[in-house]
Structures are given as C-alpha cells and as structure tokens.
C-alpha cells in the first residue's frame, strides 16, 4: 500500500510530468509525428541502447569501488542488480530509488545500511561534479549558445559547484575528526537517553565510513576513470541516436550531443517519475530552438530515446526487484 508520503510524491511527480508533457506536445501534428517513427533507423537506437547498458555497468562497478574501503570482498552482480532496481523505483517514485538501492545492496552484502546510504550520497556528489565538468566543456566549446538561450544555467552551475565543494569539505572534516565528532554527539545524546546514544554512535560511525573512498588512495583513479566512462556513454548515446532520425547532418554533431546531455541533466533533476515530461519538453525545446529541427522530429527523438531507457531500466529493475522480493510499496 502507499503511505501518505509516497502517495504525495507520486501525485506531485505526475502533475509536474503532465505539465511538461503538455508543452512538449503542444501544437504537434500527429500524422507527421507518428510518421517519424516509420523512418527511424533503429540500428542507431540499438547502438544507443548498448551505450546506456554500458553506463549502467560502469556505474555499478564505480559503486563497488566506492564501498571497497567498507567491504573489499563484494559481488559486482549485487551492485548491478541494486543499481537497476534503483532506476526502476525512480521510474515510479522520483528520488526514492536511491534509498531502495542502498537498502537492497546492504541486505545482499551484509553491510550497514548507513554506509550504503552514504555511498549513494557520494555517488550523487560525483554525478553532480562530473555533470558540471562536462557543462564546463560545453561552455568552453560554445559559450554563446548557453548565454543566449540558457543564461540562468551558468549561475545555477556555479551555485551547484559551490554547494558540492562545501559538502565535500564537510565530509572530509568528518572523516578526519570522525572519532571526536561521533564521541561528542553521542555524549550529548547520552545526557537524555544512553541507549539511543549507543545506537546513534554506531549508525553515525557506519554512515561516515561510507565516505572512506574519499581518502582511500587505492580506489581514486578507478572511480575517476569510471565516472568519465559513465558520462561519455551518456553523451555518445545521445550522439548516435541523432543519426537514427531524418535530420540534416549539417545541423548535428558531437557538440549537439553535449548540449542534449546538459539539457537532459536538468530534465532529470526535476522530480518527475523517470524524467517523464521534463526530459521531453526540454530536449524538444533545445533541438527546435537551437538547431531548427522540426518539432515532430525533435519530439520523436525525445520520446524514443527516453522511452527506450525508461523501458529497459524498468524491465531489468522489475525483474531484479521481483527476484529479490524487494518491498517497494509498503506502509
């Protein structure tokens, strides 16, 4: 059953998705739109799918390295299955997949749930950092296009970078002075409840341990390399998919894919189920407004590229969730 919090998030997510879908499909000529899919070269969509699946494999492997300081002997399969379950849950409840995947992995690998959650938070910090890096590359490549059409994006990126930098420094401080910080807080809580203080000390220590990859030199280069590979897969997936549609080759290039990646990142930040609506609206708007691509073709690109990822992630995630009997909807 839905609890009130999940029901509220679900309703809000659907409402936001409908809002964006309205603008994405507004004024579309349905006969032209449907004919777009008859002329798609699905070989390029298959190549896109390979890049998507590779990104998931790299993401699961990176997560394994992030938790290596906590537990060195782990199963890559468990990380991959938990990753896909997270995508599946996010397709329904925005952001909830991050918590579910952490709990799933914690149960499979018999590690602290607090450490699992901390590792997922570290994942998100890395994702934002590398998204900002590729946004910076796009800005250096063609600064004018962002200043003209997305003037707010630069300020948002700067603010995000500042926040991530502060969070990273705070985590580093926690790791360096972990014992003193945990001891001080547990003593304070112990004034009111000794049993709670003991429990709090164990949970907080486990949570901070989940960030150990930051100062564990043996995994740094693997995490950085895998992060680059994840995002290059995203960009190449967007790039090869462009060739599946009847778009003038003069209008598209690798920079087009980089722009699509930046815009799609914003689309997935908006809390809709699996990026539904927000992705479609922003990608369609970018292809039409920046490159003069026909509305129906641009929308077809958005629908097909999003749909393939959404369905594949959902099928894999549903299968693994069913296999592990993961409880997603509960009181």
Image (tube, rainbow, N blue to C red):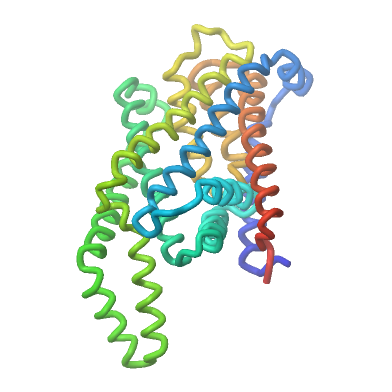
Residue 100, picture quadrant: bottom right
Q: Which quarter of the rendering shows the N terminus?
A: bottom right
Which residue is depicted at the point 52% across and 55% down?
Answer: 98
Q: Is residue 181 above or below residue 151?
A: below
As rendered, which of 181 and 179 lies closer to the eye? 179
| Residue 282 in view | yes
Q: 154 or 222: which is nearer to us?
A: 222
| 219 sits to left or right of 49 | left
Q: Residue at x 46, y 53 (%)?
A: 74
Q: Residue 249 location, x and y as percent?
A: 53, 8
- Does residue 15 appear left or right of residue 118 in this picture? right
Asked whether 8 or 217 is in front, the reply is 217
The x, y position of residue 41, in whole percent, is 67, 14
Outermost front residue = 73
**Between 98 and 304, the one nearer to me in the picture:** 98
Q: Residue at x 42, y 44 (%)?
A: 62
> In the image, residue 234 lies at what x, y percent?
49, 30
Total residue callouts: 0
- Residue 236: x percent and y percent? 48, 23
**Screen quadrant of the C terminus:** bottom right
Vertical position of residue 208 compared to residue 316: above or below: below
- Where, by quadrant of the figure, is residue 210 drawn? bottom left
Up/down of 251 relative to 223, above or below: above
The correct choice, above or below, for 250 with respect to 289 in the image is above
Residue 21 can be seen in this image: no
**Residue positioned 70% across, 25% down in the render:** 28
Residue 99 lies left or right of residue 227; in this view the side is right
């Amino acid at each position: 059953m839905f609890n009130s919090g999940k029901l509220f998030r679900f309703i809000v997510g659907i409402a936001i998705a409908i809002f964006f879908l309205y603008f994405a499909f507004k004024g579309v000529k349905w006969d032209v739109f449907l004919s777009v899919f008859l002329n798609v070269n699905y070989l390029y969509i298959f190549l896109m799918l390979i890049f998507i699946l590779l990104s998931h494999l790299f993401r699961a492997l990176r997560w394994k390295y992030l938790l290596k300081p906590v537990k060195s002997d782990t199963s890559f399969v468990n990380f991959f299955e938990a990753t896909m379950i997270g995508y599946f849950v996010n397709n329904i409840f925005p952001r909830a997949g991050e918590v579910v995947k952490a709990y799933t992995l914690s149960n499979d690998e018999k590690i602290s749930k607090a450490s699992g959650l901390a590792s997922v938070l570290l994942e998100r910090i890395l994702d934002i950092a590398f998204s900002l890096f590729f946004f910076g590359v796009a800005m250096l490549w063609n600064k004018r296009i962002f200043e003209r059409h997305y003037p707010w994006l630069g300020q948002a990126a700067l603010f995000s970078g500042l926040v991530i930098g502060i969070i990273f420094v705070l985590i580093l401080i926690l790791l360096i002075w972990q014992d003193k910080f945990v001891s001080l807080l547990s003593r304070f809580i112990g004034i009111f409840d000794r049993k709670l203080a003991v429990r709090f000390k164990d949970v907080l220590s486990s949570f901070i341990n989940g960030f150990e990859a930051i100062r564990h030199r043996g995994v740094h280069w693997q995490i950085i390399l895998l992060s680059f590979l994840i995002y290059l897969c995203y960009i190449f997936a967007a790039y090869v998919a462009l060739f599946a549609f009847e778009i003038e080759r003069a209008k598209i290039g690798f920079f087009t894919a980089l722009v699509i990646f930046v815009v799609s990142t914003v689309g997935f930040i908006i809390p809709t189920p699996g990026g539904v609506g927000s992705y479609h609206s922003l990608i369609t708007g970018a292809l039409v407004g920046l490159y003069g691509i026909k509305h129906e073709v641009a929308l077809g690109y958005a629908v097909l590229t999003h749909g393939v990822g959404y369905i594949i992630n959902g099928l894999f995630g549903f299968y693994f969730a069913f296999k592990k009997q993961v409880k997603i909807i509960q009181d």
